[in-house]
Structures are given as C-alpha cells and as structure tokens.
Image (cartoon, rainbow, N blue to C red):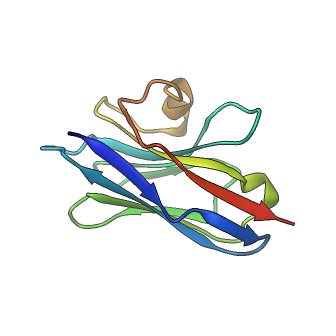
C-alpha cells in the first residue's frame, strides 16, 4: 500500500525552527514530484515547496530563503526544514506526490486538490 506519513509538526515561537519529515512507502517507483502543501484555518490549501525527480526545487514566495526542501538518497524521505517561522506559517502541512510531469508552484496551485497521493498532515503552530 502506497503511503505518505508526515512527522515533525509542533508548536514554536516566532523566529524558531522546525523540520518536517515525510516517509514514503509502498512505491516501486517514487512519483516524479514530491511536495509540501499547507492549509491554514479558513484558507485554501497552498503549495509551499516541491522537488522534482531531477533535483530541481521550487518554493513559494512567502517561504523563499526560510524553508528548504530535500530528499534523502533513496528518495523515500522528504524533508522540509523551516526557519525564521512566522505566525502566518501556522497550518496543517501535507506531504504530497504526483507522477505527472512538472512540479512548479504554478502546477501545485492547479493540483492543490488532486495530487495523486497525500499524507494526513502534521500541524504546525507558530505563536507571536
């Protein structure tokens, strides 16, 4: 069974750091695009960062310079390092994956509700 399982969420004060992890299992071949989305209360889900099979990374404007996405050598663990966290970073963070071509933030916006695979999410709360 193909699964994505997030971990690492929690509560932190503004300016702090957190690292989220996503463990992928059950895939014979990992999907081309691995991504992190987030959804704040009352808002639409948005793409935060993504990494394509060729190693290219994409970031939303609000997180550039603060967040870093990476995969381990096997590709089975996706990580999102978050620093200088702000209250507006609060939300449920989802790991997602898709086999289709492309992985840009524009594509993530279009696929924000229909990526092929989703984790259940992990909650991040940033207090001021």
- Residue at the extreme left of the image, as rendered: 28
x and y, in percent, of residue 23 in the image: 33, 57
Q: Is residue 66 visible?
A: no
The C terminus: image quadrant: bottom right
Q: Tell me the residue at 26%/40% (across/down).
A: 31
In this view, 21 is above or below 42: below
Residue at 18% across, 44% down: 27
Eyeballing the image, is 100 above or below 59? above
Residue 16, image x and y in percent? 71, 75
In this picture, residue 27 sits left or right of residue 36: left
Picture quarter with the N terminus: top left
Residue 122 in percent (x, y) is at 54, 53
Residue 116 lies in quadrant: top left
Q: Where is residue 57 drawn, in percent x and y?
A: 44, 53
Q: Would you say residue 57 is visible in this rendering?
A: yes
Q: Is residue 70 above or below residue 91?
A: below
Looking at this view, is 72 or 119 the one in front? Answer: 119
- Decide if residue 65 is on the left or right side of residue 32: right
């Amino acid at each position: 069974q193909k699964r994505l399982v997030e971990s690492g969420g929690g509560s932190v004060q503004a300016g702090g750091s957190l690292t989220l992890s996503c463990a992928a299992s059950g895939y014979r071949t990992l999907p081309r695009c691995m991504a992190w989305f987030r959804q704040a209360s009352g808002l639409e889900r948005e793409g935060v960062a993504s990494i394509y099979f060729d190693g290219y990374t994409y970031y939303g404007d609000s997180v550039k310079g603060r967040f870093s996405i990476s995969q381990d050598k096997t590709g089975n663990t996706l990580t999102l390092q978050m620093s200088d966290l702000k209250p507006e970073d609060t939300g449920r963070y989802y790991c997602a994956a898709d086999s289709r071509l492309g992985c840009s933030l524009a594509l993530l916006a279009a696929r924000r509700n229909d990526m092929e695979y989703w984790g259940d999410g992990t909650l991040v709360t940033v207090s001021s």
